[in-house]
Image (cartoon, grey):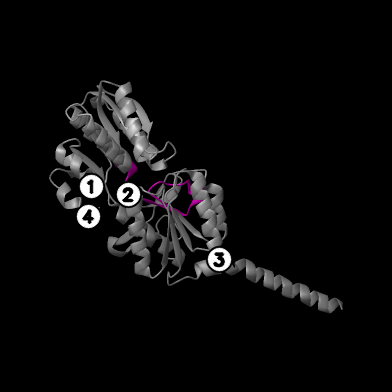
Amino acid sequence: MKRILNLFLVLTLIFALTGCGGKDNSSEGNKDGKGKYAIIVKNAGNPYNEKEMEGFEKAIKEIGGDAILKAPDQPTAEAQIQMIEELIAQKVDCIAIAGNDPDALQPALQKAMNAGIKVLSLDSAVNSDSRMIHVNQADPERIGRVQIEAISEMTGGKGQIAVLSATSQATNQNTWIEWMKKELEKSEYKDIELVKVAYGDDLRDKSVSEMEALLKSYPQLNGIISPTTVGIAAAGKVITDKGLTDRIQLTGLGLPSEMAEYIESGVCKWMYLWNPIDVGYLAGYTAEALVTGKITGAEGDSFEAGTLGDKSVITVGEGTEVMLGDPYKFDADNIAEWKEIY
């Protein structure tokens, strides 16, 4: 009887160990990349996010996987946490997320990683403990500094300026704004005053309201920087509707398709962006590289990202990143050709 009991305990232990390792082995053994890949963007109805999802889906189709596209109604961490929980239950292979908060998502994303799911962030990073790698649009320092250079040139290097951002928790926006402030410390900008950073939460109506409030609070305002596609389009509309084209200068990050009318009318002399389709596309191939074991997210890793070519993993701050490229300038000379693309 004792021998039978011992045999039963050994068999039970073997079964338990096999069961515990099942998820990890499945995730690491998915060598062909065919699996379930999910992307969670900031919120629904956001044109920039829609383009990111388009690029992500394109990449996943190229590798033969299934793409799951998620967009909460509101740009909140709570809404994204609920979606993460749902994806854990679906046993997806990878979650790519544009975080609405850098830290609040950590418990849910760590739960996903503990379940064997590969996790990466794109566009708006979550903290390094919440993901394996981040897909960045461009060098954050260049993004921040170039927008100050632009508004300074537009305003003649003097006057009051304000920033119309997305949410106060958006890591990408906050990083860019910090670099803007560092650029403003240069002596050449001594006659420029940053009076306020306002937040439109990447919602069209709220961004319009915040822009109107800025004009009311600062009647001598000379320039607006809006490093968000929703915000810059809203600012362009307000400036146009109020007939302030000659007084208020506008730049930032915008979609060519949405900003073409404002660039062509002179409301916005020029702006910057990268291709959000490419951001999502790169995230898709980064996800595939993680799932197939081509990379672990460590510095020095490299992989082939479809039509974007070879990409390398670098260390930035406390985590690692894959960089898409430099911000691109859109103006009256090139906007016509780009507005039909995205």
Q: Mark 3 = which residue?
A: 24
- Proximity of marks 3 and 4: CB atoms separated by less than 8 Å: no
Q: Crowding at label 2, few (<14), some or many (≥20) Cα neighbours within 10 Å?
A: some
The amino acid pointed to by label 1 is Pro
Tell me residue 211's x, y (percent).
31, 31
Task: Please state which of residues 201 and 292 is positioned toward the viewer in this rendering.
Answer: 201
Q: Are marks 1 and 4 in contact (CB under 8 Å)?
A: yes
Q: What residue type is labelled 2?
A: Pro
**Does label 3 or label 4 sit earlier along the sequence?**
3
Circle 1 Cα neighbour tier, 10 Å, few/some/many (<14 / 14–19 / ≥20) = many
Distance between the alpha carbons at the discs numbered 3 and 1: 43 Å
Q: Distance between the residues labelled 2 and 3?
A: 36 Å
Helix, strand or loop at label 2? It is helix
How far, Cα to Cα, is label 1 from label 4?
8 Å
Task: Find out whether the residues at labels 4 and 2 contact each other: C-beta distance under 8 Å.
Answer: no
Label 1, on which residue? 256
Read off the residue under disc 2.
47
Magenta range is: 121-142
Residue where numbered disc 4 is placed: 341
Relative side of 140 to 30, left or right: left
- How far apart in space, not on screen, are marks 4 and 2 (Cα)? 13 Å
- Whether 135 is among the magenta residues is yes
Q: Percent from the top left, x then y, of residue 304? A: 34, 64
Residue found at x 38% / y 60%: 284
The magenta stretch spans residue 16: no
Give the label, 2 or 3, closer to the camera: 2
Q: Earlier in the sequence, mark 2 or mark 3?
A: 3
Relative to 141, say whether 38 is above or below: below
